[in-house]
Image (spheres, rainbow, N blue to C red):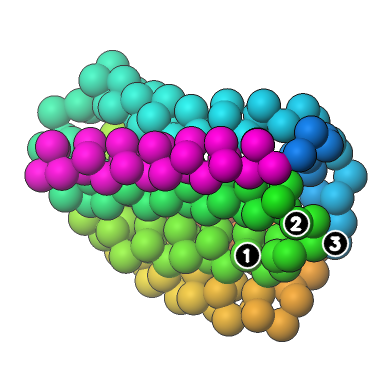
Amino acid sequence: MRNKTGLIIFLLTVSAWVIGGIVLLQNEQDIVIHWNNHGQADGYGPRWLLLLFPLMIPLTDTLLRFCRRIDPKRHNYAKFASSFTTLRVTVALLLWICCMITSAEAWQPGITNVSMLICFSIGGLVSICGNIMPRIRPNYMIGIRNPWTLHDESIWRKTHRIGGWIWFGGGILLCVLSLWQLEFMIFNAWILFIILVPNLYSYVLYRRSASG
């Protein structure tokens, strides 16, 4: 499984490099590297960034694996190894999609609906995270990490069970709403909601256990 995951990440990186390199040879104009909340281009950079952006895929994966090794609760990762692998591949795929959007816009500006694709992709990431969340065990890198969940494994387990449902459903809703040109203000508000609710729930559980 470890070799398979590494191969997937390698192929995503190489394909992003190849496509970025092909687009790089098309012309010498600057490329769009940032879009505002309405999906409109508002930041530009040199075309050679098309060859730099794919590096985010292996570098981010390396960072994830490094953080796992230095995590004080690293012994728990063996209990959700497959979920951690799913997260690695999902994050790599999201970064690959970002590279593809940048390359497509560099090749032909306006060819993609940037805001829709980004919202849909993030919604997919959130939903996948929600699906694996109940299987995640206490650690300092992944999941709903706060003083209350890290204080009590029972609170961690209950919070991630509820949080998993909220994130899974919330991610699917984001995907659906993105098809109707979801405003970034609503998008950000919904992301904030699905983050706050499980954290507040963990605090309530902690208060109940402390008073009981």
Residue at image coords 74%, 73%: 182
Q: Height in image: 174 above or below 14?
A: below
Residue pointed to by mark 3 = 38
Task: Tell me the crowding category of disc 1: few under 14, some 14 to 19, or many 20 or more residues within 10 angstroms, Cα based.
Answer: some
Secondary element under disc 2, as helix, strand or loop, is loop
Which callout, 2 or 3, points at the residue further toward the start of the chain?
3
What segment is highlighted magenta in the picture? 1-26
Q: What predominant SS class does the magenta segment belong to?
A: helix
Q: Position of residue 65 (x, y in %)?
A: 29, 27
Q: Where is residue 23 in the image (x, y as percent from the top left)?
A: 63, 43
Q: How far apart are marks 2 and 1 (CA)?
A: 16 Å
Residue pointed to by mark 2 = 108
Residue pointed to by mark 1 = 117
| Residue 209 in view, yes or no | no
Secondary element under disc 1, as helix, strand or loop, is helix
Which callout, 3 or 1, points at the residue further toward the start of the chain?
3
